[in-house]
Image (cartoon, rainbow, N blue to C red):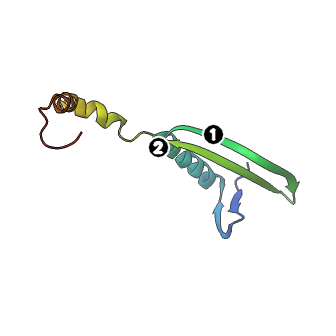
Amino acid sequence: FSEDIVIVDARLPSFQLEGLATYQRILSTLHWSIKAATDQSRFEITSVLPPVNNEVYMRWRLHLWPRDVLKDARGFLDNFGAAGAAGAWRDGLGMGMPI
């Protein structure tokens, strides 16, 4: 890409990202955010039109599968006997609250 690249979303043409450094930062931030917040992602380019007057039109779709935010908490709570409390509840020794 050239240094004077401009990224424009057809849905919001007044908002433009200008310059190669900006483009690289946006892609880097997007990549980091996706890896941090999702278990899986899939990027699809749905159509690309040939360049006309140095402009390329591209449609794309990003599928995201969010992380299980409680996955780490489940192991943490087990260390405090949450599993033991569940067993006590089943045995009629509960603390008065459903589990």
Q: Residue furthest front?
A: 92
Q: Quadrant of the C terminus?
A: top left
Residue 37's label in the rendered image is: 2
Distance between the alpha carbons at the discs numbered 1 and 2: 14 Å
Which residue sits at x=50%, y=43%?
A: 32
**Residue identified by numbered label 1:** 42
Q: Secondary structure at mark 1?
A: strand
Which residue sits at x=80%, y=49%?
A: 47
| Three-letter code, disc 2 | Ala
Q: Could you tell whether 35 is left or right of 44 in the image?
A: left
Residue 33 screen position, x and y as percent: 50, 46
Tell me if mark 2 has few (under 14), some (14-19) or many (20+) residues whose alpha carbon lies within 10 angstroms of its own: some
Residue 26's label in the rendered image is: none
Which residue sits at x=70%, y=43%?
A: 44
- Which quarter of the picture shows residue 5? bottom right
- Which quarter of the picture shows residue 73? top left
| Three-letter code, disc 1 | Arg
**Residue 46 vs residue 31, the one in the foreground:** 46
**Residue 62 vs residue 93, the one in the foreground:** 93
- Going from N to C along the chain, the mark reached first, 1 or 2, is 2
Residue 97 screen position, x and y as percent: 17, 44
Q: Secondary structure at mark 2?
A: helix
Which residue sits at x=30%, y=34%?
A: 74
